[in-house]
Amino acid sequence: MTADLSTEQARERIRAAYDPTLLKQAGYVLVEALADHLAGVQQGQGPVLPWQAPEDLVCEAAEVRDQIPPAGTDRAALVDRFRQLLATMLEKGLNLHHPHYIGHQVPAPVPIAGWFDAVGSVTNQCMAIYDMGPWATAVEQSMVRRLGEQIGWRVGEFAGLVTHGGSLANFTALLTARNIASPDGWEQGVTADGRMPVLVVHSDAHYCVARSAGMLGLGTRNVLRVGLDSQRRMDPNRLDELLSDLRKRNRPIVATVACACATPIGAFDPLEAIADICRRHDVWLHVDAAHGGCACLSARHRHLIAGIERADSLVWDAHKMLFVPALCALVLYRNAAHRFEAFRQDAPYLFDPSAPGMAEYDSGMRTVECTKRAAAFGLWGVWSMFGPQLLADMVDVTFDMGRLLYEKLLAAPDFEPLHEPECNIVVFRHVPSGWQNMAPERLGRFQLELRRRLIQSGDFYIVSTNLEGIGALRVTIINPLTTPRDLDQLLDALRAQAARMLSDSTS
Ligand SMILES: Cc1ncc(COP(=O)(O)O)c(C=O)c1O
């Protein structure tokens, strides 16, 4: 009897949570609130980052969490609770659509992309095998094909997949390269024949590349870094020397990892020259184009990645310069024959041997993930609504803004650009008057403190970095709504913040 009653109460609570009318009413609240929020943020209203100390925020989130409405709360009260939670979420987050957000390589996404993702989330269209998410699979493969064509390949000859971020994408491609370089490596381990393979990488390669070497069992000590030229691009001559030496010593080489572009200052490697060298030494060429793959959409910037179509594998993050919400990263293989090389598995409960043709469409055969979020809905939705021209426009506008910022920095006596940008990543320092001869270490520390104070003020969101060991300011103009006026305001905001710091330190 008691059991029946508690079962009935449980059923009642479950019904309330799955109530489609609740979903509809909360949905109206959501649409209104998000659209109003973005309208304000996009016009620069409110802080970019509503800074709060992390532990305070954790306590606040826990406090809000615990105000759970009692069981049996009516629908209207649940909608109110939803409204309140939503308002808190919007109030507390980083506002990437604010024109003063020019921080990490994470964009202000095309907002409507989120609606496509929401459909995938609400209906939980996940992937592993084709029939778990047929439309998710179709959408993903349609984008893989379209973007591979944009790289310069022919449908049917190349293959690819979408995974959760550039780090996992690089790992997956490098695992494929490792398995090809050491065909017994998956079963026997990579040193089965006593020779440890090496990974040859751009000196400024993203940290996930060395991390991949650790995860692949190669060891980070077997990551060999190729020297850079004066523009921080991989030096093809030094690559040639290194590969010649390795071949002479009979060391197995997993791959050369080139960058398009490298994270620190957005330098694009000379891919044609690098591809020639890799071909001559018979070495797999992997191009980390997480950020710069987008250049192939722009007639004006395509030259930056000339030769990319010669890569054996490449990584391209749609959640960077294709302006869709995180995470959506592509791994592409020039030769479709390599599409199943990364993983081996024995999972009869999942993969159906009676339909081997289906493996082509079972994402779990090619990715680290078994269950995988349908990550390409946003990209497919934006592409289908606006076409590739919108993406090309956003690449051009943001790359142009990088150039413009550089020109403004050059013209300002109290700023020092540290390189000539090739894209929308710009690294520089503020050198207040009287600081021209300051010790570099102190000037560097000053940049880091300046950045921290600036972001905590809520006025701008930028990042800091180290160049040659000395602190610097770094921006990625990855919000296509940022205008030249915002860049002037950035320089003024940095000056004002620096003046306050200096007066604080003397008072
Ligand atoms: C060149 C490059 N590769 C890989 C990554 C890692 O991508 P994710 O943050 O999606 O893992 C980044 C991140 O900024 C990057 O700049």
Image (cartoon, grey):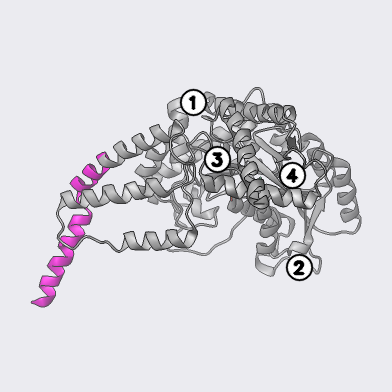
Marks 1/4: CA–CA distance:
29 Å
Q: Which residue lies furthest to the bottom in this view?
A: 2
When the figure is inspected, residue 66 is found, relative to residue 137, above or below; the finding is below
Q: Can you tell which mark lies on residue 387?
A: 1
- Residue 339 visible from this viewpoint: no
Report the front residue among 378 and 478. Answer: 478
Callout 1 secondary element: loop
- Give the residue pinned by disc 3: 460
Marks 2/3: CA–CA distance:
50 Å
When the figure is inspected, residue 158 is found, relative to residue 394, above or below; the finding is below
Residue 185, x across and y down, in percent: 70, 64
Kindly identify the residue that appears in the image at 50 percent across and 55 percent down: 364
Return the disc, 1 or 4, that comes first in the chain's sequence: 4
Task: Decide if residue 413 is on the left or right side of residue 102.
Answer: right
Report the front residue among 307 and 422. Answer: 422
Give the residue type at disc 3.
Phe
Return the disc, 2 or 1, that comes first in the chain's sequence: 2
- Residue 359 visible from this viewpoint: yes
Give the residue type at disc 4.
Ala
Residue 432's quadrant in the figure?
Answer: top right
Give the residue type at disc 1.
Gly
- Give the residue pinned by disc 4: 258
Report the front residue among 2 and 459. Answer: 459
- Give the residue pinned by disc 2: 191
Return the disc, 2 or 4, that comes first in the chain's sequence: 2
Q: Residues within 10 Å of mark 2 (few under 14, many from 20)?
A: some
